[in-house]
Amino acid sequence: MDEIEKLNSSTMREDAVAGNGLLNRRALLRGALLSAGIAAAGVGVAKADDSVGTDAPEWMKTPGKPFSAYGTPSHWQDKVQRIFTIAPGRAGTGVSRTPLHLMEGTITPAGLHFERHHNGVPDIDPSRHELFIHGMVKQPLAFSLETLMRYPMESRIHFVECAGNSGIYGAPQPAQVTAGEINGLLSCSEWTGVRLSTLLAEAGVEKEAKWVIAEGADAAAMSRSIPLEKCVDDAMIAFYQNGEAIRPEQGFPMRLLLPGFEGNMNVKWLRRLNVTDMPVDARDETSHYTELMPDGKARQYMFPMGVKSAILKPSFGMTMKGPGLYEISGLAWSGAGRVAKVEVSADGGKSWAAAALTEPIMSKSLTRFRMPWKWDGSPATLLSRATDEKGGGQPTRANWVATYAAGQGYHNNAIQSWSVGADGTVKNVYA
Amino acid sequence: MDEIEKLNSSTMREDAVAGNGLLNRRALLRGALLSAGIAAAGVGVAKADDSVGTDAPEWMKTPGKPFSAYGTPSHWQDKVQRIFTIAPGRAGTGVSRTPLHLMEGTITPAGLHFERHHNGVPDIDPSRHELFIHGMVKQPLAFSLETLMRYPMESRIHFVECAGNSGIYGAPQPAQVTAGEINGLLSCSEWTGVRLSTLLAEAGVEKEAKWVIAEGADAAAMSRSIPLEKCVDDAMIAFYQNGEAIRPEQGFPMRLLLPGFEGNMNVKWLRRLNVTDMPVDARDETSHYTELMPDGKARQYMFPMGVKSAILKPSFGMTMKGPGLYEISGLAWSGAGRVAKVEVSADGGKSWAAAALTEPIMSKSLTRFRMPWKWDGSPATLLSRATDEKGGGQPTRANWVATYAAGQGYHNNAIQSWSVGADGTVKNVYA
């Protein structure tokens, strides 16, 4: 019973790791909580007595609900929905966001995966859908879904992030909106499919080829130019999302997955891959998804998403329940590979401490970070900043804004911040 | 363009790695497919021509469907449902299974997570639900959900497997049912919650304590006795499943998670943890979830689930489309830790080859294995066997059956097998 004795005899203390109450997580996980605030302060923890369990709640007194063929969330969770900018029920072009501030962990259930459609969600008959590979190839090919399913598959956990995610963080004044509204064009799934390189090898790519034009089977025929190097690296034709067939909003029956590249390039409802020697200058790589610079020129083809992090708990819309122990928690990610480090500050950036990262840390995937915080009840400013395995980091917001023309909204990976007021309210600030 | 040249000039061949057509996966992923069968045999692969894309399907000619607040699967997938033994819509005691044979990867979407209820699914008001820790503790405690949410959390991907999973594999004759019907009391999720050891440290466990009696807030008050060692090891009070609040069928608003232990002990709708010095001999650890031995005695408290594997593709209900290249794929797992190795045989167990395992391999989680197979069209028998990092392996079915009394249905982790007929049909056999 060594473990038990260790548990009870723990003498570990709430060690500070940075200014304004950031604590050592390892110490807290075992035994130091009584002194840190939750039970000691009696915040919502009642002392139980011997009558425990004699007053069974009414849901224990009657048989429960039946089995179901395909489960749905609890009705108590009906506010946990995608966040719309246009009214739900409308088709056309637009987005809906993942409510990251109401979620935990790293996986996004498919029902809450963000949406970005250019002319609605097509209803594709999978038995009639074909994928064409043509252009500068030795042998143009047409694949049915059934045939593609016979190729060797891979499963990998990757995020998809819209290039326009967090664009509002470039606005002159900080918008008082939730973390989901700011950062929710970001979701993470286990994707399963066939490596694109396998199919390109079968078609036989010509020596002069440099690009692949991917086209979706939606009513916008959404198209993007993709460097051939990416297509023969980790690109995947994905058929499954979190174990089941990919959802209509994410590309049923198949999508292109380009791990770490801006979401728009991960063409949904994938229909054609045209191998070429130059990009096609499609609508969504000229009128959209370019970066307007201060000199009036626009940068095109900025593909990988930068390293980034966001504190989700606490965040706008939440209210702290008085001084005491809290967990600061959020997500970090990078289009270049693995997250190497996330640092958190509770004093507006004066001091920083490394947060705990949830293992296993996967390349081009979301990583959850956590940091215990003993809030003393006075105003505080919280920030997070991530570094990836390639050494990439996040710019300050001031630096990011100075890099681009006013109103440029793509690839915003600036350091974000929240203020906590003495009354416990949390607001968006530019620290 | 080194990658491109490598892609086209690949001289790798379909190297055999074991008898009856098992191939080297690494070779196949790049370039060797033309000779291996899919495109060369023309199975569903048409040669495209210059008119590609001129005949747009009708779903490209009209705006698609609107955005949605919470997405659902494609209507083309409406047969991908949980598998019932009692009619859906009935409550009470029973199970529904995850349709593993229709799925891919390792994550189970919550809507398809298997169900095991003892008196239906309670509809618990989360704001009124409390978790009590009492018994042999220095300070009995009662927690609201809101209070528990303030403790340091963890996120981990773990499987949950019912102790009765694959019980049908002990039947005298092989049942001609799908792999989901055989093995689908098995699901895998990312769980997020508070380590139980943190809460027990706060309550202060007495020196003589050895067990914790966990009770659910369902109408069966489902209870199990759990060794205290497990409770202070990797046990978790889970609130989130795949990023969102845990689903009603899996314990909303909270469940006990005991990674690797039989599913029944992972008490759902968790309400009480009574710390004691002896087990309680609850209904579900006496009348159920015990192992009847040949001498008429029953073994109790066999907690960890054994190492196990199952081929899901191909499996019963599927028909091979003629000779050529296929991928054999399935899942492996162990209640003792990580899967170390999965071997596949295509010749009834005469020769074996190591399958590719999807990284990262996580402890007490599902691991997907894959093995390319060139089927020559003659009858074949496929088997898989897993080994875990502790050296544990799977018994043959004959050895497993000989260990127990007839009809014993728990903890069946025997090696499973499928036969493939010359007509391409797949059947359950005891190889």
Image (spheres, coloured by chain):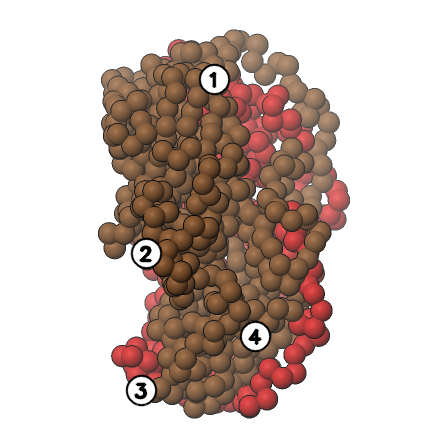
Chain colours: A red, B brown
Farthest residue to the front: give it: B295
Q: Secondary structure at mark 3?
A: helix
Q: Does label 2 lie on the same chain as label 1?
A: yes
Residue under the point 58% across and 35% down: A251
Vertical side of B90 occupied by B59: above or below:
above
| Circle 1 chain | B
Q: Secondary structure at mark 4?
A: strand
Q: Secondary structure at mark 1?
A: loop
Q: Which residue is mark 1?
A: B423
Three-letter amino acid code of the residue under disc 4? Arg
Three-letter amino acid code of the residue under disc 1? Asp
Percent x, y for residue B89?
71, 51
| Of residues B390 and A366, the one drawn nearer to the viewer in this rendering | B390
| Circle 2 chain | B
CA neighbours of label 2 inside 10 A, class few (<14), some (14 to 19), many (20+) = many
Q: CA distance from mark 4 to mark 2?
A: 28 Å
| Of residues B123 and B289, the one drawn nearer to the viewer in this rendering | B289
Disc marking residue A9: 3
